Image (cartoon, grey):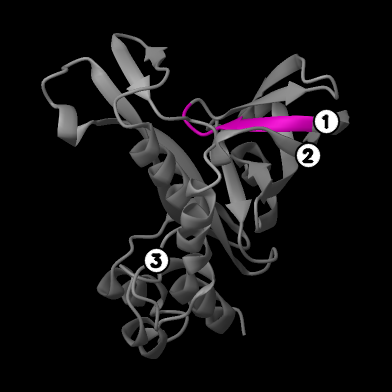
Amino acid sequence: MNKLIIPIIFSVLFSIKTTAQAGAFTDPAQGFNKMMLDKSGDGGAFDRVGAYKVKGTPLLFGSKFPGVIYLKDNYYKDIFVSYNTFSQDLTIYDKDNKAVANKKANEVDSFNIDIKITDYKASLKFISASLLGLKDNYFLQPLTPKQKYSLYKKYKGDLAIVNDNILQADLRQYDLMVEYYYTEEGVAGLKKIKLTNNAVIKEFKKIKDVSPIVNEGSFVFNPEVILLSVFEEINK
């Protein structure tokens, strides 16, 4: 990656750490994905997915990172892991950079990865949806401790039309979507959160009135900040 581009990328990525005064919200992984797409332009390598040529990367933060993977009855440590958000699987690499295994989400209990790109550092944990009693094949990032109401984030890779190159009907790009879900202790299943003020207020009105928190911010600019405050309140 061009060294001149990296500081620009991470000035965008760090916007997640800001509060309601920020001008715009950018999830770090989404910000990285967008910058890599902008940088690649029409050049570079393409993936082949069915009938489509796809530009960009489906990998979270575009690469592999040191991590640990916990399986149902075993674990991998001292490895590198890449997380494919489109296929929702993990590729495991040994110290010699050799791919040694591939695991689907329903084969894994959880995994941790340590992201380090220039000045951006983060230790991220993901769990398999199967740990929540679901049969779906995807991973979730816990955003709160496990409590009565627990908040999760889902990264979901998608194939999107390339708006500035609509003449190539077979061309697509990897877009990274973010969705939020929650669980309630003692209640089976996972519930998706619709990111509008009215929807969130209505969702939790039987528990607490969260309108002062929700109406103080904006789900366009700060969805995660607001949701974390909401879940702190409803778990009191």
Q: Which residue matches tag 2?
A: 67
Q: Which residue matches tag 1?
A: 79
- Report, in whole angstroms, how far the alpha carbon at label 2 lies from the one at label 3: 27 Å
- The residues colored magenta run 80-86
Looking at the image, which is closer to me, 104 or 130? 104
- The quadrant in which residue 205 appears is bottom left
The C terminus: image quadrant: bottom right
Residue depicted at x 64% and y 66%: 144
- Report, in whole angstroms, how far the alpha carbon at label 2 lies from the one at label 1: 6 Å
Q: Which amino acid, mark 2? A: Gly
From the top left corner, tell me how far across and down residue 98 is, in percent: 77, 15
Q: Is residue 15 above or below residue 158?
A: below
Using residue 93 as the reference point, say whether residue 41 is left or right of it. left
Asked if the residues shown at circle 1 and circle 3 are in contact, with their CB atoms under 8 angstroms apart, the answer is no
Residue depicted at x 71% and y 31%: 81
Asked if the residues shown at circle 2 and circle 1 are in contact, with their CB atoms under 8 angstroms apart, the answer is yes
Main SS of residues in magenta: strand
Residue depicted at x 48% and y 73%: 225
Q: Extreme bottom residue here?
A: 212
Mark drawn on residue 188: none
